[in-house]
Image (cartoon, coloured by chain):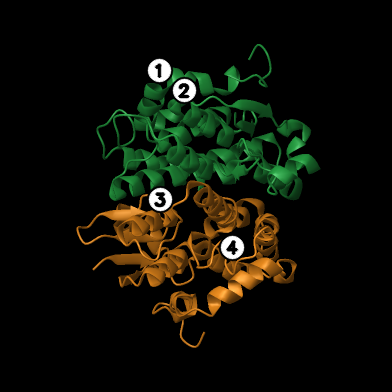
Chain colours: A orange, B green
Amino acid sequence: MMTLHGYWRSSASYRVRIALALKGVEVSHKSVDLRMGAQRGADYLVKNPQGYVPVLELEDGTMLRQSLAIMDYLDATFREPGLMPGEALLRSKILAASLVIASDIAPIQNSSVQNYIRAEYGQGDAGAMQWAEHWISKGFAALEQIAGEYNTPFLMTEHPMLFECCLIPQVYNARRFGVDMSAYPKLMAIDAACRSLPEFEKAKPENQADAPQGL
Amino acid sequence: MMTLHGYWRSSASYRVRIALALKGVEVSHKSVDLRMGAQRGADYLVKNPQGYVPVLELEDGTMLRQSLAIMDYLDATFREPGLMPGEALLRSKILAASLVIASDIAPIQNSSVQNYIRAEYGQGDAGAMQWAEHWISKGFAALEQIAGEYNTPFLMTEHPMLFECCLIPQVYNARRFGVDMSAYPKLMAIDAACRSLPEFEKAKPENQADAPQGL
């Protein structure tokens, strides 16, 4: 069985959990406690020199890193249901929307960057919230406009795909950081459609074994 | 003919120029002058609501956004030489290394984030340089370690692929921001191997029509 090294609240881990649930693939979960700095421990840096979660450890010990690359592997290995369409144009568009989140929102609002602006620029909780809110809102505004061009229950499709694996964890973070989601009705509709599905329920942070009890 | 809306110095535009050159695909180039704020103009925001370059405009007017998604489209449409291997595991590893740059370095050190830390945190040129240097060095240190596991002229292959399309523009930025590249001998060897190829020469910022003369 494969092992997912992740953390309940990490949005990149959450993406991969959704992908695994959509494909019905069971894995063993190993928690990397980010609050305790486990991601910077020597034993974890062997798994991922970046010190980021998640890592998908294959049965032969191969370590796959970066959530989008892990999902690419999962999609090639467990083909149905597909996370990406076969047609090149739609595929590029879904990938582009996914990268708005995975490249232009999440890495900027994540904890390592927030820690830097706290340490180097003297920002406190309010400053960190404002930072996160700024980059999330900027990306979501563009995605809301893109989503407005389609009349599908999910971004561009009848079934959740790669984009939805990225969106729902980012909406989770947006709520944590106090982003007013009412500005994004199309994204909210996709979020609601996903939340009604058991695969997304299973992948939720608060349903993970390493989440604090009573959350 | 397709049109690439880009900017000579944009590293994401530079990635796509390398991919096009490797595949021998000619496009029309249209400059979006980032210094003049052209990316925030209403006519450009129709092309890309994010206000980022590049955009690849297809012959039918379809706008493709996000450099990695554009390269995915190019790789599906113009198959040889491939930017990604067919085998799922190697593909995932090359994509992961590419995402270290495309998600965890470039979006954090790019001009929109640098402008934010200047405006909100009162950082000047030195602070912006330090910011860029920090995130580039962090990512390159991880990539150097990954690159050390392979004895190939390019990251994991005999020919340049997606990773090299991402690396060379990031090294270009690293030099701009004063990063000491001697700490990354494997990455430097890949950079040198790429720079000896005419496709990479053609894609260089200083060889673009919108670059300042006499650069």
Q: Position of residue B16 (x, y in %)?
A: 53, 33
Answer yes or no: are tags 2 and 3 on the same subunit: no
Q: At 42% from the left edge and 78% from the top edge, which residue is drawn?
A: A208
Gap in angstroms between the C-alphas marked 1 and 2: 8 Å
Gap in angstroms between the C-alphas marked 2 and 4: 36 Å
* Numbered disc 2: secondary structure: helix
Residue type (three-letter) at the residue carrying disc 3? Gln
Q: Relative to B200, is B77 above or below?
A: below
Q: At 59% from the left edge and 58% from the top edge, which residue is drawn?
A: A109
Residue type (three-letter) at the residue carrying disc 1? Ser
Residue type (three-letter) at the residue carrying disc 2? Phe
Looking at the image, is mark 4 or mark 3 earlier in the sequence? 3
> Is B143 or A20 nearer to us in this picture?
A20
Gap in angstroms between the C-alphas marked 2 and 3: 28 Å
Q: Disc 3 sits on a residue from what chain?
A: A
Q: Report the mark closest to the observer, 3 or 1.
A: 1
Q: Quadrant of residue A58?
A: bottom left
In the rendering, which numbered label is found on residue B200? 2
The residue at which mark 3 appears reads as A50
Q: Position of residue A118 (x, y in %)?
A: 62, 57
Q: Relative to A36, is B181 above or below?
A: above
> Is B188 or A83 nearer to us in this picture?
A83
Q: Report the mark closest to the observer, 1 or 4.
A: 4
A191 displayed left or right of B143: right
Residue type (three-letter) at the residue carrying disc 4? Leu
* Numbered disc 3: secondary structure: loop
Gap in angstroms between the C-alphas marked 4 and 3: 31 Å
The residue at which mark 4 appears reads as A155
Q: Disc 4 sits on a residue from what chain?
A: A
